[in-house]
Each structure stands twice: as structure tokens, then as C-alpha cells.
Image (cartoon, rainbow, N blue to C red):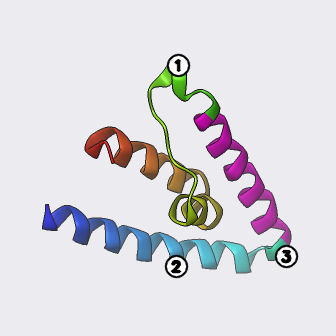
Amino acid sequence: MMFIKIFLCIYVVVYFIFLLIFYFKTKKPFKNFLIFSTFSLIILFIINLTSKFSGIYIPINYFTTGAAVFYGLPGIIALVILRAIFML
């Protein structure tokens, strides 16, 4: 279990570094950040709206909203996988 936590921490840090590089290499980093953040929050709300059919419910709190905003679609996919594996 400790190995999974260490792997996830390393994954988050590496992905965050690549995300910062991507945002600052574009000509309009703030606009890209807003577009991807809005898109990922909409996906998070759609997942919660379809939770009765899919069985996967991701609670809306600071952690899940932050993961959706800062990490985008890969962050939401990670939340769904963690929810499915650990039933947190």
C-alpha cells in the first residue's frame, strides 16, 4: 500500500511539471488553463449526474475540485480509478 502512495505522489509531481511546461509554452497560458479547467469541471459534474447509472460517485470537495481544475482530464481519470479500486 505504501508503494502505491509513493507512486501516486511521484506521478502527481511529474504531471504537474509537464502541465506547467505545457501551459507556459503556449501563447495564451491563462486562456488554455481556463478552457481546460472548465471542461474538466463539467466532466466531473457529468460523472456525478450519471452516478445512479454508472455506480461511480465522486464527492465534490476541495480535493476533487482541485484535481479536476489543475490536472484536467487525467486528474478525473485518476479519481475514477482510485474510486473504483479503493471505493473511497
Q: Residue at x 56, y 59 (%)?
A: 61
Q: Earlier in the sequence, mark 1 or mark 3?
A: 3
- In the picture of the structure, the residue carrying the numbered disc 3 is 27
Residue 88 position (above or below residue 14): above
Binning the other alpha carbons within 10 Å of mark 3 as few (below 14), some (14 to 19) or many (20 upward) gives: few
- In the picture of the structure, the residue carrying the numbered disc 1 is 53
In the visual, does 75 lie left or right of 81? right
Disc 2 is placed on an element classified as helix
Q: Which residues are magenta?
A: 31-48
Q: Position of residue 34 (x, y in %)?
A: 80, 64
Residue 19 is covered by the magenta coloring: no
Q: In this view of the protein, which residue sits in the foreground, 3 or 51?
A: 51
Of badges 3 and 2, nearer the viewer stands 2
Q: CA distance from mark 1 to mark 3?
A: 41 Å
Q: Residue at x 33, y 48 (%)?
A: 88
Q: Could you say which disc has been placed on residue 17 in the image?
A: 2
Q: In this view of the protein, which residue sits in the foreground, 30 or 58?
A: 58
Q: Earlier in the sequence, mark 3 or mark 2?
A: 2
